[in-house]
Image (cartoon, helix red, strand yellow):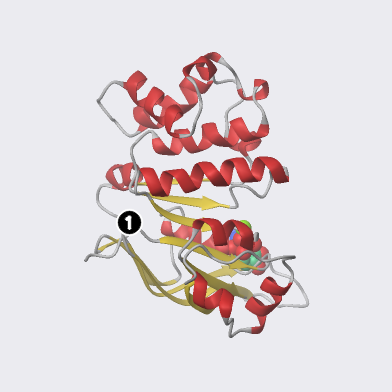
Amino acid sequence: MTAMFQTESLCRTFKLPRTRVLGAHASRRALDNINLTVNPGDRLGIVGESGSGKTTLARLLLGLDVPTAGSVSFLGETLPLADMKSFRRQVQAVFQDPRSSLNPRMSVADIVREPLECLNIEESHSARVDESLAAVGLSKEICARFPHELSGGQRQRVAIARALASRPRLLIADEPVSALDVLIRDEVTAVLSGLTTNLGLTLIIISHDLKVIARLCDKILVLHRGIAVEHGAVADVFRSPTHEVTQRLIASVPRMPVARNAP
Ligand SMILES: Nc1ncnc2c1ncn2[C@@H]1O[C@H](COP(=O)(O)OP(=O)(O)O)[C@@H](O)[C@H]1O
Ligand SMILES: [Mg+2]
């Protein structure tokens, strides 16, 4: 089986602004030697404290940033691919805050349709818009509305629908429920869960909410200061976390649910 994503010794270092204390060449290693395989159908959760490198990893996988060392390959080909439009049709993203990721001047229909135009998808756009909205449980009536006329949960559903419009094989979601109220979090988590089950979508989700990871994921990667300190099946890692960071993350959750894959 060809891996969907494979990273080899992936590193990303950021130069820090020049200061008298740190000197001219100070830099921060945001990701250090990450070797990760994501297979078709995987549901991988990435967790770690703030600043541990989660978003940096997501951006590298999305081809939005370039490694300092090492590589990312998609279906066996190293990024950037010659045909990045084909890559973007297959790999889509959802970000944290739908208020800033949705254009306030565009209607829902135009928002969901936009990637179809950018990615030169020729099939009927209105059929794809309807299909994408239905996949996230929104009715067609919402098409003429604007983001400010929607609830927080509806806005994030629209962002997910936009990501689904090109019928991707893989979705990368960076803290997709963190900006939402607790009840709405459940609603959006249920939508994501449905997509992995019904569409067979491969999912990479970043969340600091381990309950979300337990509900959606079968694998987990724990990052700490850019290093992968734990990586394995969610059920195993939750049952016997080996790294202190993972133990702390688990201990901070009241009434931790059992992972859905736990025996
Ligand atoms: N564009 C950038 N320039 C400088 N430093 C950055 C940049 N992006 C991220 N970093 C640094 O890299 C580290 C990891 O950041 P990030 O991947 O955003 O963490 P997380 O998403 O886990 O909170 C942090 O120390 C952050 O300050
Ligand atoms: Mg982040």
Residue 16's place in the image compared with 55, above or below, is: below
The answer to which image quadrant residue 151 occupies is top right
Residue 204's place in the image compared with 197, above or below, is: below
In this rendering, position of residue 210 left or right of residue 192: right
x then y, percent, for residue 239:
57, 78
**Which of 145 and 66 lies nearest the eye of the viewer?**
145
In this rendering, position of residue 110 left or right of residue 166: right
**Which of 247 and 63 lies nearest the eye of the viewer?**
247
x then y, percent, for residue 160:
49, 38
* Count of labels in the image: 1
Considering the image in quadrants, where does the N terminus appear? bottom left
The answer to which image quadrant residue 124 occupies is top left
Q: Residue furthest front?
A: 263
- At x 42%, y 44%, the residue is 195
Residue 228's place in the image compared with 158, above or below, is: below
Quadrant of ligand 1: it is bottom right
x then y, percent, for residue 133:
45, 28
Residue 3's place in the image compared with 86, above or below, is: below
Packing grade of label 1 (10 A; few <14, some 14-19, many >=20) is: some
**Which of 120 and 231 lies nearest the eye of the viewer?**
231
- At x 58%, y 42%, the residue is 188
Q: Which residue is tagged 1?
A: 80
**Which of 64 and 249 lies nearest the eye of the viewer?**
249
- At x 46%, y 66%, the residue is 261
- Can you tell me whether the CB of the residue at mark 1 lies under 8 Å from the nearest atom of ligand 1? no
Q: Amino acid at mark 1?
A: Pro
Kindly tell me whether residue 228 is visible in this rendering.
no
Kindly tell me whether residue 104 is visible in this rendering.
yes
- At x 32%, y 56%, the residue is 80
x then y, percent, for residue 92:
41, 45
In this rendering, position of residue 66 left or right of residue 85: right
